[in-house]
Image (spheres, rainbow, N blue to C red):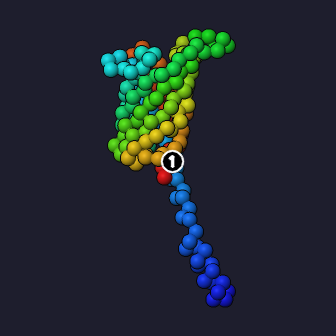
């Protein structure tokens, strides 16, 4: 490479816009245990739930779900309800707000189950600018809910 070519190459590299840093993505697995509450519940459907999340990668903290939509499930799945709401994960190093959309009231062997998809909407602290999603599979008990979450959180 001659001197002029080397100078042109260096000039191009030094003046090129910096590429955005690739996000750091981490697989998250955990368990949410929560219970319904009514006092201070801001849900138009009058359904909120609060509890805890215990997961890998320091994904430990509290949760609060506020349902903002519910409709009867399909005729082919009688007794089900399609729901949507915002769930906030409050973790040691930040918060993560997700949109949860799911189906509840599924019956299996006399037990009530639910499933949902959570899409990251926003975050703060370590989770500022985060993206990602979770899959949820849970069971409803008389006084609380237990759900496994599995997914991915990507931070800038």
User: As drawn, is 54 to the left or to the right of 28?
Assistant: left
Location of mark 1 (residue): 154
Of all residues shown, which one is farthest toward the bottom?
A: 2
Query: Is 51 left, or right, of 9 in this rendering?
Result: left
- Numbered label tally: 1
Task: Please state the horizontal and vertical placement of residue 9, each as a whole percent of the image.
Answer: 62, 78
Q: Is residue 68 visible?
A: yes
Query: Residue 93's spot in the image, x, y percent?
Result: 36, 46
Q: Is residue 33 visible?
A: no
Q: Nearer the viewer, residue 77 or 118?
A: 118
In the rendered image, residue 74, in percent from the top left (x then y), is placed at: 64, 15
Percent x, y of residue 122 = 46, 40
Residue at image location 58% in from the left, 68% down from the top: 16
Disc 1 residue crowd, few under 14, some 14–19, many 20+, Cα 10 Å: some
Quick check: 17 left or right of 30? right
**Where, quadrant-wise, is the N terminus in this rendering?**
bottom right
Residue 13, above or below 67 = below
Give the residue at x 55% y 74%: 14
Front-most of 83 and 16? Answer: 16
Give the image quarter of residue 76. Answer: top right
For the residue pair 22 and 15, the one nearer the viewer reads as 15
Q: Say which residue appears at 36% left-offset and 33% top-offset.
A: 62
Residue 113 drawn above or below residue 29: above
Identify the image quadrant of residue 10.
bottom right
Q: Which of the pair 147/82 is nearer the observer?
A: 82
Looking at the picture, does residue 95 appear above or below residue 103? below
Q: Which residue, as the protein is rendered here, is positioned at the far left?
A: 39
Q: Residue at x 55, y 31 (%)?
A: 117
Determine whether, in the image, residue 135 is placed left or right of residue 41: right
Disc 1, SS: strand
């Amino acid at each position: 490479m001659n001197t002029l070519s080397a100078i042109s190459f260096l000039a191009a590299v030094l003046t090129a816009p910096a590429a955005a840093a690739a996000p750091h993505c981490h697989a998250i697995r955990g368990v949410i245990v929560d219970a319904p509450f009514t006092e201070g519940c801001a849900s138009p459907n009058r359904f909120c739930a609060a509890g805890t999340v215990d997961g890998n990668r320091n994904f430990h903290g509290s949760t609060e779900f506020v349902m903002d939509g519910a409709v009867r499930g399909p005729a082919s799945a009688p007794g089900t309800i399609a729901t949507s709401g915002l769930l906030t994960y409050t973790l040691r190093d930040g918060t993560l707000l997700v949109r949860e959309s799911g189906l509840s009231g599924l019956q299996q062997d006399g037990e009530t189950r639910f499933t949902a998809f959570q899409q990251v909407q926003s975050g703060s602290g370590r989770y500022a600018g985060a993206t990602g999603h979770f899959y949820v599979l849970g069971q409803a008990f008389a006084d609380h809910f237990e759900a496994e979450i599995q997914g991915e959180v990507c931070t800038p």
